[in-house]
Image (cartoon, grey):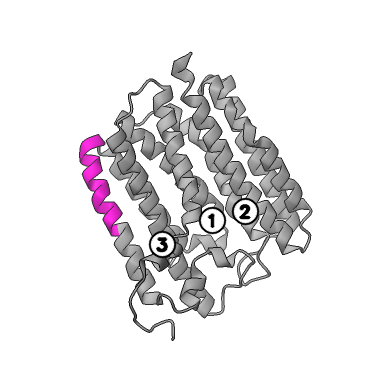
Amino acid sequence: MTPNDTHEISLVTVWQLSRPASLSVTAVAWLLGLASAAGCGISLDWASALAALLLTGGFHAGTNILHAYHAARQEAAGGLARSPLSANDGIHLIRQGRITLAQTRQVAWAVLGLVMIAGLALAVKVGGGLLLLGLAGLMLTWAFTAAPLKLEQWGGAEIGAALAGWLAVLGTDYTQRHHFFLVPAVDAWSFALLVAAIPLTQRATWPATPKPRLDLNAIGALYVALIVLAYAWLVGGVSLLYQPRQALWGLLSLPVSLAAAAWLWGAGRQPQRACRAWQLSLVAALLHGLAMAGGLVTVTMF
C-alpha cells in the first residue's frame, strides 16, 4: 500500500496520530489556568472549564496531526532522519500505510475546523478575547509547521512549545474571568519555559540531519539555561508579589529538572540516555504545572 492509496480511516489510528500522551501537557496547562482563576477568588464555571479543556485538547491534537503530515512529507523527500523517539511522533502510522498523507491533512483540518467553530460559540459566552487567543494559536500552528516559514525545522520548536503552553493557561483562565489579567500571564511562564525544554531535549536523540543541528554540549547548556530561567521566574514573581507564595509549590519539580540535565550532559552519543533526559523533562514540566496548580488553589483557603 502506498502513502497515497485511499482507504477507510480508523478512529484508533486518528487517536494514535494525535499523540495522546503529549496531550497531558495541555491537560496540566488547563488545570493551571483554572487554579490561577480559583486562587484569585473566581467562582469556577465548570461548563466553560470543560469546554476549554475540549478546545485546547482538540487544538493540540489537530496540530499534532498536521505536524505528522508535514513531517511525513519532509521525510519522503529525504529531509528528515529518524530518532529513537520517532515511534511516538505519529509519522510511523503513515509509513505503515494505516492512513495516507492526504487523509492525514484532511483529518487535521477537520479537527482544527471543529475546534474553531466550537471556539466561536464559547467566545459568545465568555468574551471576544478568546478569539484573539485562538487566532494566535492558529498563527503558531501555521508558522511552525507549514510552508513557507516552517519555523520548527529551523529551531523554533522550543519557542512554539512555550507559547502554546502559555496560551493554553491564559485561555483557560480567560474562560473564567472573561477578561485578561496579569496574574495568569505571570503564573504561566515558568511552566511554559519547562514545556519548551521538552523538544530541546528531544533534539539530543536525533542523528545528524539537513536541519540546523546543535551539538550535545550546546543542547545541555541551553537546557540548563531554560530551567534556571524558569525557576528564577517563579521565585522572582513571588518575591515581587506578582504571584502568591503558594506558587512556590512549583519548586517540587526542580530535582526532576536537575536529573534531566544530568542525563543530558552524560548522554554523549548514547541515544537511550538522551531519551531518558527527554522523559524526565516531560515529567518535570507536568509536575511543575500540577504542583503550582495545587498551591494556587489553596490561596483562598488560608
Name the secondary structure under disc 2.
helix
Cα distance in 3D space between marks 3 and 1: 22 Å
Which image quarter: residue 254?
Answer: top right
Q: Is residue 125 magenta?
A: yes
Cα distance in 3D space between marks 1 and 2: 8 Å
Name, please, the residue furthest toward the top: 302
Looking at marks 3 and 2 on the same chain, the residue that comes earlier in the sequence is marked by 3
Q: Residue at x 28, y 53 (%)?
A: 116
Q: Residues within 10 Å of mark 3 (few under 14, many from 20)?
A: few
Above/below status of 217 relative to 42: below
Q: Main secondary structure of the magenta part?
A: helix
Looking at marks 1 and 2 on the same chain, the residue that comes earlier in the sequence is marked by 1
- Residue 15 marker: 3
Identify residue type, mark 3: Trp
- Residue 199 marker: none
Instruction: Give 174 or 180, whichever is nearer the viewer.
Output: 174
Q: Which residue is mark 1?
A: 157
Q: Residue at x 34, y 67 (%)?
A: 107
Above/below status of 161 relative to 170: below
- Residue 200 marker: 2
Looking at marks 3 and 1 on the same chain, the residue that comes earlier in the sequence is marked by 3
Task: Please give left or right for residue 300 compared with residue 248 in the image.
Answer: left
Q: Is residue 279 magenta?
A: no
Task: Tell me if I can see residue 163 in this picture.
Answer: no
Q: Residue at x 73, y 52 (%)?
A: 264
Closer to viewer: mark 3 or mark 1: 3
Extent of the magenta region: 113-126
Closer to viewer: mark 3 or mark 2: 3
